Every structure is written in structure tokens, then in C-alpha cells.
Image: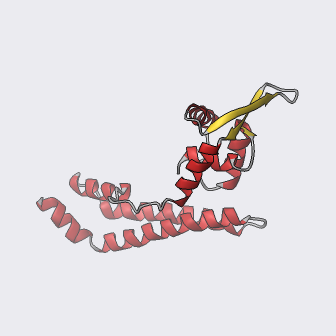
Amino acid sequence: MSTRHILLGLLAGGPSHGYDLKRRHDDRFPQARPLAYGQVYTTLQRLVRDGLAEVDGTDSDGGPERTKYRATDEGARELAEWARQIAPPAPFVANEIFAKVVVSILAGGDPDAYLRAQRAAHMARMRELTAVKTAPGADLATVLSADYALNHLDADLRWMTTTAARLTTLTAEVDSA
């Protein structure tokens, strides 16, 4: 996910302080990793440097001085271009789970035990996400975000089942190479 473009998208709704952008990011993308304040302010500085955002004043509201930012016309154009671009499927899939299975075979470990433990971890996370999306009052963004993660975890589980069924063959191939 492009923090730069997400912040531009949040600024499209009007000028905002870094603190408010961080809070709105975390609210709009509830299953994403929360943004660190440092990441927000560093990204805002880069957006200003690149002419995609500008300072729209400061205020203190009785507290520390806070800088308000707004997207520039160039920022709005870049955001629109980014939003239109199709996200290409990854040309190479580097999968940590697969790497650990192969390394386990190479090191004389127990890849089947690893796959069982990983499956249990995935199932636990799927139960957590199901609880999140079915909680009373869950908003649609939370439900859709949880559904996205659940579908990816389900694909991992299907892959683990297929791989576990082929471990004998995979072990023979890895050992002979």
C-alpha cells in the first residue's frame, strides 16, 4: 500500500493535520498496520517537497502548534493517475511459508509439523478476523478488510493442504538437487 497516495487520498477531503490523517487512516483501513506518526510526518514532508501537498496554515487550539496540509492540484492529478492504474499481479511469488518448508527439508527438519503449526496459526487468525467482521456495529470497511484477509488466509490454507499431500515428492526433489 502506498502511504504517499493514501495520505493524498485523505487530503482530497480537505486540509488536515498529520494527527488527524493518521487517525483517519487507521479508521478507514482498520485491518492494515496502523501508521506511525513519524511515517505520516515524513511522508507529508516529502509530499510538500515534491509539490503534491502544501502547508495550509498552523493552529494550536490551546495545545502545541499543529501544521495543516492540503493537496495541490498536482497532488490531485497524481492521486487520480495512481487510482486508475491496475495493480499488476506479482510476477514472482516469494512465499515465506514455502521457503520454510524447503529449508526444513534441507536442514533435516519436520516440514509436516511446520505446516500443521502454521495451519493452526492461520486458523486462529481466521477466527479473530471472523469475530471482528461479525461484531455488532462492524462497519463495511472493517467487514471488507476482514474478508480480504480471510480470503488470503484461506488460499494459504489450501496451498498448505496441497503441499502437505506432496511432501514426499517435494522432499525427494529437494534432496536430489
Residue 132 seen in the figure: no
Q: Residue at x 59, y 43 (%)?
A: 74
- Residue 38 in the image, given as x and y percentages of width and height: 61, 33
For the residue pair 51 and 151, the one nearer the viewer reads as 51
Image quadrant where residue 61 sits: top right
Q: Is residue 3 above or below residue 110?
A: above
Left or right position of 41 against 24: left
Q: Residue at x 45, y 70 (%)?
A: 155
The outermost residue toward the top is: 64
Q: Residue at x 69, y 49 (%)?
A: 12
- Residue 16 in the image, given as x and y percentages of width and height: 74, 40
Residue 149 seen in the figure: yes
Q: Residue at x 33, y 60 (%)?
A: 91
- Residue 149 in the image, given as x and y percentages of width and height: 55, 63
Image quadrant where residue 109 sits: bottom left
The outermost residue toward the front is: 73
Left or right position of 66 against 31: right
Q: Is residue 163 above or below residue 58?
A: below
- What scheme was used to colour the molecule? secondary structure
- Residue 90 in the image, given as x and y percentages of width and height: 38, 59
Q: Is residue 45 above or below residue 132?
A: above
Image quadrant where residue 148 sits: bottom right
Left or right position of 99 against 58: left
The outermost residue toward the right is: 62
**Quadrant location, the C terminus:** bottom left
Q: How many marks?
A: 0
Q: Is residue 106 above or below residue 171?
A: above
